[in-house]
Image (cartoon, rainbow, N blue to C red):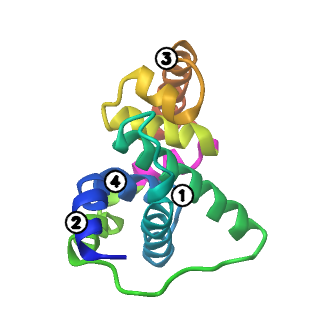
Amino acid sequence: MSSDFYRSSILPYAAIVIKICRAYTNTQEDFEDYYQEVCLQIWKSRENFRQQSEWSTWVYRLSLNVCLTLLKKKKNNYQHFASDALPEEVIEDSHAFSDEALNHLYDAIRQLSEIDRGVILLYLEEKSYQEIADIIGTNPNNIGVRIKRIKERLKKRLDGKVN
């Protein structure tokens, strides 16, 4: 992957890719593997981008799909990841594993269904219901209802009312 492509087409969206990867992993090592795989798949799939949506929407959708696929593979005890070192700016952004409050939030998010994790991460990125619906593949009304329910579940978990 060229560093120019990374800097121009992936790095501007690294924050959401980091959040998505973090929501589907429990360790720094797994996070780094997921992040590298997402970047690799964005690079490999760049020719498939048909401009039917924004580049950012496509990156988010691809990131979610890659993380969901890796999660399924991990459940089946199959793993295949690149092992190159991550860029320094990604490592700095991902060191939230040492922040207890953020860890508590991610623990609560990880308890959501796989799709609900993606929905709430996109909501936290201030994406519109329409954008989230486009990425997830549903309609905006469904997203509104889903977000309301997700927020209620997260609030209960964060308040210590649910394990």
Label 3 – label 4 distance at C-alpha: 24 Å
Q: In front of the other: label 3 or label 4?
A: 3
Of callouts 3 and 4, the N-terminal one: 4
Q: Looking at numbered disc 4 in the image, what kind of residue is underneath it?
A: Leu
Taking 122 as reference, is 40 above or below it?
below
Counting other residues with Cα less than 10 Å from the Cα at mark 3, is it few (<14), some (14-19), or many (20 or more)? some
Segment tinted magenta in the rendering = 104-113
Task: Describe the element under mark 2 as helix, strand or loop.
Answer: helix
Of callouts 1 and 3, the N-terminal one: 1
The part of the image, by quadrant, that contains residue 125 is: top left
Q: In front of the other: label 4 or label 2?
A: 2
Q: Main secondary structure of the magenta part?
A: helix
Q: Is residue 145 something one can see in this rendering?
A: yes
Q: Which residue is label 4 attached to? A: 102
Q: Which residue is label 2 attached to? A: 7
Label 3 – label 2 distance at C-alpha: 34 Å
Residue 70 horizontal/vertical position (percent): 63, 64
Question: Pointer 4 and pointer 1: residues touching (CB < 8 Å)?
Answer: no
The part of the image, by quadrant, that contains residue 4 is: bottom left
Instruction: Please name whichever residue, 153 or 125, is drawn nearer the observer in this view of the structure.
Output: 125
Residue 22 horizontal/vertical position (percent): 44, 59
Label 2 – label 1 distance at C-alpha: 24 Å
Label 1 – label 3 distance at C-alpha: 22 Å
- Give residue 24's mark: 1
Residue 47 lies in the magenta stretch: no
Q: Is residue 163 something one can see in this rendering?
A: no
Instruction: Please name whichever residue, 136 or 99, is drawn nearer the observer in this view of the structure.
Output: 136
Of callouts 4 and 1, the N-terminal one: 1
Taking 106 as reference, is 37 above or below it?
below
Quick one: quadrant of the N terminus? bottom left
